[in-house]
Image (cartoon, grey):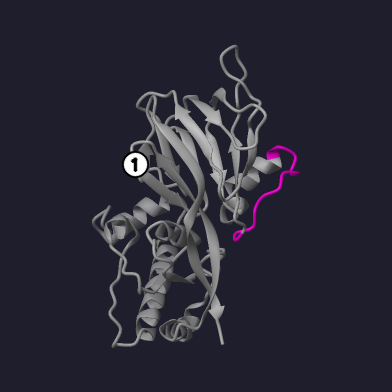
Amino acid sequence: MARHGTREQARFHLAQRDVRLEEVEARHHRFEAVQAEVARAIPLSFRRTRIVRDDLARFVFEPSDVVVAIGQDGLVANVAKYLLEGQPVIGINPDPAQNAGVLAGHVPERAEELVQRAAEQRLAIEARTMVEVRLDDGQRLLALNELFVGHRSHQSARYVLSAPGSEAKREHQSSSGIVVATGTGATGWARSIVRERGGEHALPSPVDPWIAFFVREAFPSPATGTSITEGRIAKDACLSVRSEMGDGGVVFGDGIEEDRLAFGWGTGARIGVAKERLHLVIGAAG
């Protein structure tokens, strides 16, 4: 409606794409019903607020907050990077027929029980590993699934890579970019890369204290090598990258390109296991 002005114009637009307006409306009404059900589950005495995804970067979470994320799994990943005090996250899946529910794994009917258990501090928590990047100018970015280092267009990414434990300690590379994945992200982008490479490369579990990196399509040339294309990064180690790209060099996490760090020529990055973890509620305790 916001985009097309009238309901019938929206219907016409969707019909050109073989989508029925009634299907979109049904999903919308289901989501609104779940929001209302979860709101009723929160005691009136609790301080509360509602945040949409686009406002996460501007919201300041309090250490004692309990976060109820209603939506797809990606919403839980998006909110994780802003929870620096280990606030518990209850993921509610509003549409199990459409959403996998890996991170948003609870049905709406459990909201009341879980919110009450949160108030009593009786929740079963899974502490999921996160990945961080620190630039040499002080900027920092967290991600739950993976970080991407590369060029924001389809140009080759050029950089100098130093990996922990590699025989080739330092290498100039030209590639399609670097993916650094946690165990949570091991079911997505990293899994696809491993499958293309034969499927025999170990990936961490969501709670393992190490992460994996992969160089995508490294290109051999007189000036660039291909000897460091994958590996592990332990808790106390890091992957070092020095950019040889112009203004197009970027680092972003969890597929959110808008929330990126500029990674131009000469900028250094250190990537490793973050001290923060996502405290994902997996059930009630006690």
Q: Is the magenta stretch mostly helix, strand or loop?
A: loop
Residue at the spot of label 1: 138
State the residue in front, 169 or 92.
169
Q: How far across and down, in percent of the image, does residue 275 sit?
A: 47, 56
Is residue 26 something one can see in this rendering? no
Residue 254 x/y as whole percent: 47, 49
Q: How many marks?
A: 1
The quadrant of the picture occupied by the N terminus is: bottom left
At 28% from the left and 80% from the top, the residue drawn is: 47
Q: In which quarter of the image is the C terminus?
A: bottom right
Queried whether the magenta region covers residue 91, the answer comes back as no
Q: Does the magenta stretch include residue 201?
A: yes
Instruction: Indicate left or right for 196 with 94 as reference.
Output: right
Of residues 40 and 147, the one nearer the viewer is 147
Query: Residue 233 placed where, x, y %?
Result: 59, 44
Residue 20 sits in which quadrant?
Answer: bottom left
Residue 191 in view here: yes
> How busy is the neighbourhood of tag 1: few (under 14 within 10 Å), some, or many (20 plus)?
few
At label 1, the amino acid type is: Gly
Question: Is 264 placed above or below 213 here?
Answer: above
> Which stretch did the figure color magenta?
196-207
